[in-house]
Image: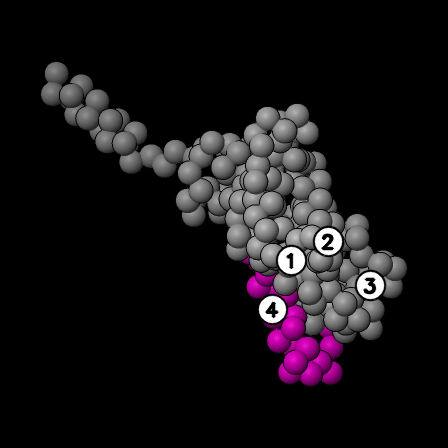
Amino acid sequence: MRRKFFIFGLISFLVSCAVITVNIYFPEKDVKEAYKSLEDELMKPEKPQKGKSDKKQSILNIDIVTPLYAQEEGLAKKITETIKKMPEVIDAYRRMGGRLEEIDRLRDSGVVGEGNNGLLLNRSNSLSEEERKLIQNENEDRKIVMKGMAKAIVKINGLPDNESNIKQVMPQAIKQFVSVKREKAKSGWWIQDDDGKWYKK
């Protein structure tokens, strides 16, 4: 009898110590679509609208979400609208748009390339300190964007956006970001494949 209680107690203890992993649904196609939509919308230079001199007004319009509209447009739209409620991600996209011309110049010259981790990688020893800082700032913003996507997916799954859940979906968020960057790369730009080898598009 004691043995049965001991075995039962041991099983209960092991079950209570077990780490429960929740599989988080990750819609790859919709995430990719959301990345493209956000880049197209937020990385373009802002044009002043006639009759609207207050810049804050246009930013506030971005954050307004109509849940029904998001549902009608599909999951990609819902992801996009979720991210638009994250000021740090919106700011990162705006900064990336502001330096896009300089980043394109570096990519055109071949001194930097699109890494397989979603970041710009230095391919030359001839970069100036200013150019290195530019790449560093770009990569910091890219990290914010990719983490924002991971947070959005966790939220859409109805889970708390804690570090554990975010960490689970980060590899997929990075993978889709990389995929978009590869597709949008111009001919002649350097791209790193999944094995770490470089090729020209």
The front one of 144 and 115 is 144
Magenta stretch prevailing secondary structure: helix
Q: Which residue is mark 2?
A: 50
Residue 16 visible in image: yes
> Residue 39: horizontal and vertical position, in percent?
70, 51
Name the spot of residue 38 as percent of width and height, x first.
68, 47
Q: Which residue lies under the disc numbered 1?
A: 53
Residue type at the position of mark 1: Ser
Q: Secondary structure at mark 2?
A: loop
* Circles 1 and 3: CB atoms closer than 8 Å: no
The first of marks 4 and 1 along the sequence is 1
Q: Who comes first in sequence, dot 2 or dot 3?
A: 2
The spot of residue 92 in percent (x, y) is 59, 58
Q: Which residues are magenta?
A: 123-145
Residue 68: where, in percent of width, then height? 59, 26
Residue 132 lies within the magenta run: yes
Disc 1 residue crowd, few under 14, some 14–19, many 20+, Cα 10 Å: few
Residue mark closest to the camera, 4 vs 1: 1
Which numbered circle lies on residue 189? 3
Label 2: how many residues lie within 10 Å, few (<14), some (14-19) or many (20+)? few
Measured in 3D between alpha carbons, the distance from the residue under mark 1 to the one under mark 3, in whole angstroms, is 39 Å
Circle 4 is placed at which residue position?
Answer: 137
Q: Is residue 44 left or right of residue 15?
A: right
